[in-house]
């Protein structure tokens, strides 16, 4: 019988984030990490300041620290009521996944879809709207 692998610790996650994103700041204390770094999703995109918080045993939460524009006073797409980004559906992320190779790239992808939405009013990121967010006039493709 093969032993079941343990989820990655906050310390392991912190080392990988530090290695892959040296320009970011990182705090680690008692199984909780906070990563704040710049993300520029494409060469034509602006740079965004992003905060990722992760408590070991829970799902990561990501927030864009810059003020994001909206269209016609609409709510930002694919965000939760607390302002964090909806990056994946329930069950798509687990504690065996590296934040540096899952959550951070998903955040960059969300930012690309945000920029397209801002220009076109269409959300091409797919997915399911978060509970309580209400869907926008146009449904996800």
Image (tube, helix red, strand yellow):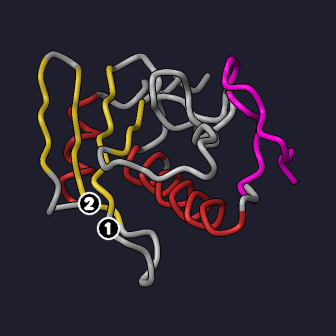
**Residues at badges 1 and 2 in contact (C-beta under 8 Å)?**
yes
Which residue is found at the position 51% from the left and 38% from the top?
Answer: 85
Quarter of the image holding residue 54? top left
Give the magenta-colored segment's residue range.
Answer: 124-141
Mark 1 and mark 2: Cα distance apart in space: 6 Å
Mark with earlier residue (1, 2)? 2
| Comparing labels 1 and 2, the label whose residue is closer to the camera | 1
Q: Residue furthest front?
A: 72
- Give the structural element (helix, strand or loop) at label 1: loop
- The location of residue 80, given as percent across then percent down, is 55, 27
Quarter of the image holding residue 51? top left
Magenta stretch: dominant SS? loop
Q: Nearer the viewer, residue 88 or 50?
A: 50
Give the residue pinned by disc 1. Answer: 47
Residue 136 in magenta stretch: yes
Give the residue pinned by disc 2. Answer: 38
Q: Is 13 drawn above or below residue 25 in the view shown?
A: above
Residue 29 in magenta stretch: no
């Amino acid at each position: 019988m093969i032993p079941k692998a343990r989820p990655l610790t906050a310390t392991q996650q912190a080392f990988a984030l530090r290695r892959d994103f040296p320009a970011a700041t990182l705090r680690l204390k008692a199984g909780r990490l906070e990563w704040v770094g710049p993300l520029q999703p494409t060469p034509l995109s602006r740079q965004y300041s992003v905060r990722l918080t992760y408590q070991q045993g829970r799902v990561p939460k990501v927030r864009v620290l810059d003020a994001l524009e909206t269209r016609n006073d609409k709510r930002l797409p694919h965000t939760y009521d607390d302002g964090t980004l909806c990056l994946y559906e329930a069950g798509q992320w687990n504690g065996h996944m590296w934040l540096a190779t899952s959550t951070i790239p998903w955040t960059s992808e969300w930012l690309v879809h945000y920029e397209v939405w801002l220009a076109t009013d269409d959300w091409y990121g797919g997915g399911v709207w978060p509970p309580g967010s209400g869907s926008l006039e146009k449904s996800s493709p």
